[in-house]
């Protein structure tokens, strides 16, 4: 026991390493399975990269504990096996610090978008390194002073500074979460943040206890083995739970990279409960399309819009029509419902406005900047200028070809068929019941078909009376 407590390789050490490996495999599967099974789009934005960075930080944290506390029995011959590499740089800035900074970055975005109602002034790829600077500075200071011994222990005097730094970041996360606690989120982002705080606070508590036991009682072999076993197993479980409580994409439909619920929504409008979002009503009244009418007025009809959209997609120029439809869906959300309007506006900005977006639309730089720097994401006229520009673009580049295309011919045929079907259905809905008819006898043209027995009886009665008179 004494030998493996110092050099590693105890049975409990291998059990702890096995548990940590299983937890990390489950964590990676949480990240990859939604993309493999459900074909989710891989958007190269913060909503995708922050969860990937969380997995990277979780791996660093678990591996640094294995390497720095002597779980495995090996000789440290190379510089990369040094305590300062694993216990200082990998475990702190690139491990727990990076993991918690990712969640703070998400809370920072939620605060600005839903409380300030504007896009964050600092991009995530800038904010994340900035918030990591204290961890980097602390690691550099420890690396210069070199307080670690051969067992990667620093001493009891470093416990308070280390725990204080960890606790400060949890406090920052608590502050941002409290600032957005009054927002009625649609996708449980607030609950996820509180659960993330609970998990991170628990991790700090477990880490502090195990750290103290390792540092102060390093002469008790069984306590060394037991404390590092608890430290690694608990850390592995907590990083898995921390990632599973996912706020990975809080501003998109089907936000989570884990599979919280079935993908029942095909669009953001449906996820937000916008009436008739993306649906074609079968009994929708057929419309007569006049090519001389303004295009923006014609596009208000959903059937025409979908036909025009299919034509634009066939020309590889459907972004403008898709943008028009989503802005039209945004207009259905009441002005007094700012949370849903912000969700939808942020979705439209991510999908169509930001440079390099999946369906970036062709609008002027000024209009794009006006949208990106708006002071109120919930304002009704946020996309009006962009709509004006894109409607003119569609009218110039697409409308003329559409009127002579097979898509328009098919649309007219379907409209004609629906018109005939509506007339037939209307005729079938007429009530021919004699009880409700105000026309009787020979004046009712349907009387003979309705009451053949009565008509026949009337004829016989008339013949009988004529025979009696004669």
Image (cartoon, rainbow, N blue to C red):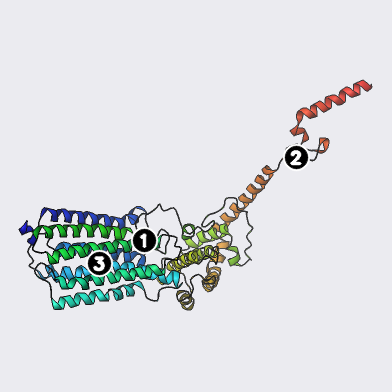
Question: Which image quarter is the N terminus in?
Answer: bottom left
Question: Whole-Å distance between the Cαs marked 2 and 1?
Answer: 62 Å
| Labelled pair 2, 1 in contact (Cβ < 8 Å) | no
Question: Which residue position is annotated with label 1?
Answer: 192
Question: Whole-Å distance between the Cαs marked 1 and 3?
Answer: 18 Å
Question: Which image quarter is the C terminus in?
Answer: top right
Left or right: 237 in relation to 117: left
Q: Quadrant of residue 372?
A: bottom left
Residue 400 in the image: x percent, y percent?
A: 57, 66
Front in this rendered view, residue 133 or 367? 133
Q: Residues within 10 Å of mark 1 (few under 14, many from 20)?
A: some
Question: Which residue position is annotated with label 3?
Answer: 96
Question: Which residue position is annotated with label 2?
Answer: 436
| Labelled pair 1, 3 in contact (Cβ < 8 Å) | no
Q: Residue furthest right?
A: 470
Q: Nearer the viewer, mark 2 or mark 1?
A: 1
Q: Residues within 10 Å of mark 2 (few under 14, many from 20)?
A: few
Count of marks, rendered view: 3
């Amino acid at each position: 026991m004494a030998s493996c407590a110092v050099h590693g390789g105890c049975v409990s050490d291998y059990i702890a390493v096995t548990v940590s490996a299983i937890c990390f495999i489950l964590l990676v599967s949480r990240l990859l399975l939604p993309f493999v099974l459900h074909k989710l789009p891989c958007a190269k934005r913060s909503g995708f990269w922050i969860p990937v960075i969380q997995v990277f930080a979780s791996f660093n944290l678990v591996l640094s504990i294995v390497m720095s506390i002597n779980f495995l029995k090996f000789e440290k011959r190379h510089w990369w096996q040094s305590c300062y590499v694993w216990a200082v740089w990998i475990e702190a800035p690139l491990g727990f610090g990076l993991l918690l900074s990712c969640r703070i970055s998400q809370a920072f975005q939620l605060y600005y978008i839903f409380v300030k109602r504007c896009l964050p002034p600092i991009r995530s790829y800038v904010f994340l390194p900035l918030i990591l600077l204290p961890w980097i500075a602390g690691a550099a200071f420890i690396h210069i002073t070199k307080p670690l011994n051969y067992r990667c222990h620093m001493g009891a005097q470093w416990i308070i500074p280390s725990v204080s730094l960890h606790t400060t970041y949890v406090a920052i996360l608590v502050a941002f979460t409290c600032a957005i606690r009054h927002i009625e989120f649609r996708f449980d982002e607030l609950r996820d943040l509180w659960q993330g705080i609970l998990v991170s606070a628990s991790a700090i508590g477990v880490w502090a206890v195990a750290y103290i036991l390792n540092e102060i009682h390093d002469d008790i072999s069984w306590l060394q083995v037991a404390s590092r076993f608890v430290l690694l197993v608990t850390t592995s479980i907590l990083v898995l739970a921390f990632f599973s409580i996912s706020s990975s994409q809080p501003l998109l439909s089907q936000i989570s990279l884990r599979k919280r619920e079935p993908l029942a929504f095909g669009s953001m409008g449906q996820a937000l409960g916008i009436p008739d979002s993306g649906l074609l009503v079968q009994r929708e009244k057929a419309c007569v399309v006049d090519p001389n009418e303004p295009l923006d007025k014609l596009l208000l009809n959903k059937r025409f819009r979908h036909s025009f959209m299919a034509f634009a997609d066939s020309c590889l120029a459907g972004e403008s029509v898709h943008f028009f439809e989503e802005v039209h869906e945004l207009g259905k959300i009441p002005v007094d419902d700012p949370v849903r309007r912000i969700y939808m506006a942020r979705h439209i900005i991510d999908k169509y406005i930001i440079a390099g977006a999946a369906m970036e639309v062709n609008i002027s730089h000024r209009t794009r900047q006006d949208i990106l720097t708006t002071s109120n994401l919930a304002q009704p006229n946020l996309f009006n200028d962009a709509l004006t520009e894109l409607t003119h673009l569609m009218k110039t580049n697409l409308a003329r070809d559409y009127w002579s295309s097979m898509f328009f011919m098919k649309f007219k045929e379907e409209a004609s068929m629906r018109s005939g079907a509506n007339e037939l259905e209307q005729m079938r809905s007429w009530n021919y019941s004699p009880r409700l008819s105000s026309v009787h006898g020979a004046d009712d043209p349907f009387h003979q078909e309705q009451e053949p027995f009565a008509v026949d009886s009337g004829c016989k009665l008339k013949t009988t009376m004529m025979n009696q008179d004669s």
